[in-house]
Structure formats: C-alpha cells, structure tokens
Amino acid sequence: MRCPFCQNIDTKVIDTRESAHGNSIRRRRVCLQCGRRFTTIESTQLLVLKNNGEVEPFSRDKVINGVRRACKGRNISEADLNQLGRQVEEKLRQSGTAQVTSDEVGTAVLEPLRNVDEIAYLRFASVYRNFSTLDDFEDAIQWLRNNTNHNAPSEDR
Ligand SMILES: [Zn+2]
C-alpha cells in the first residue's frame, strides 16, 4: 500500500473498521516517511458463479426475494427474511472463498429457512432441488419429521 502523498510503501495501519454490511474494510493508515494519514477501503465482495457460467456479485436482496416467493401466504415477517439473508451471507463468507456457486447459495438458504418455516422450506427446496415426484416431497417431509429440532445450532447433514 503506497502513501498517496509521497509514494512511500512503508505505511502502518492505525485503525480498522468493517462497514455495516460487512462487505468492506476501512483502514486508517499513517505513512512512516511523511507522517501523513490516509484511508483505504478494501472490498471483500463475494461473487456468485451462476449455472450459465456468468459471475455476478452476491446480492442479499436477491436471496431474500427468492425466499420471499416461497414464503407467500406464510406468516413470515420482513425481519425474519432480513435475518435469513444475513445468515446466508455470513455462512457463505465463512467458507473463506471469494466465489461461490449459485447451488451453494441455495444450499445455504435451506437450513435457516427450515428453522423459520417448514412449508416455505419445502416450497423452496422443491424449486431449488427440482423435486419432480411425490416421493421427493415425501422424502423431504420424512427428513423434516426426523429432524424437527428447531434449536439445532448448525448443519447436521
Ligand atoms: Zn508519505
């Protein structure tokens, strides 16, 4: 990181702050040569590789909109949806990679959605996992019946 004033490369970080959305890090630096201070912003943008090969920035809104469709008619608040969007994003970021696939996004939605509403979960899974027969639903419902621990802390598959 070069000092923008004297181009010296020896700088020291004196303060680090994460943005409210967690997608950028703001660092306050001081130049060790001229002593001037400046700010750098490092983006930690998450990218999504779609099935058609295109790459786009991860969008929490897009995830929430997809889930909202599955939640139609269910008693699920915007706050629940926002919370779910945040959980999904955190989970994907925890993987530590800068790029995930859209399948991974869908998988990351399933577990928190199951904890919010099982019907919405079934609807979302039926689209996302391409349920094609009644057996698919039956298996998913059976799985839900065997795993109805709403306080499960983490992935159990
Ligand atoms: Zn300098």
Image (spheres, rainbow, N blue to C red):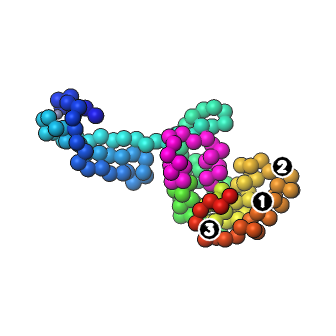
Q: Give the label, 3 or 1, closer to the camera.
A: 3
- Camera sees residue 19: yes
Q: Which of marks 1 and 2 is nearer the N terminus?
A: 2
Residue 147 horizontal/vertical position (percent): 71, 67
What residue is drawn where x is 59% and y is 62%?
154
The chief SS type of the magenta part is: helix
Element under disc 3: loop
- Position of residue 115 relative to residue 123, above or below, is below
Q: Does the residue labelled 1 lie within 8 Å of ligand 1?
A: no
Q: Give the label, 2 or 3, closer to the camera.
A: 3
Query: Mark 1 highlights which residue?
Result: 140
Q: Nearer the viewer, residue 96 or 74?
A: 96
CA distance separating discs 2 and 3: 29 Å
What residue is drawn where x is 62% and y is 68%?
152
Compared across the picture, whether 157 is left or right of 23 comes to right
Where ligand 1 lies, by quadrant?
A: top left
Q: Is residue 157 magenta?
A: no
Q: Nearer the viewer, residue 74 or 7?
A: 7
Q: Any mark on residue 132, and which?
A: 2
Compared across the picture, whether 35 is left or right of 12 comes to left
Q: Does the magenta stretch include residue 97?
A: yes
What residue is drawn where x is 70% and y is 70%?
148
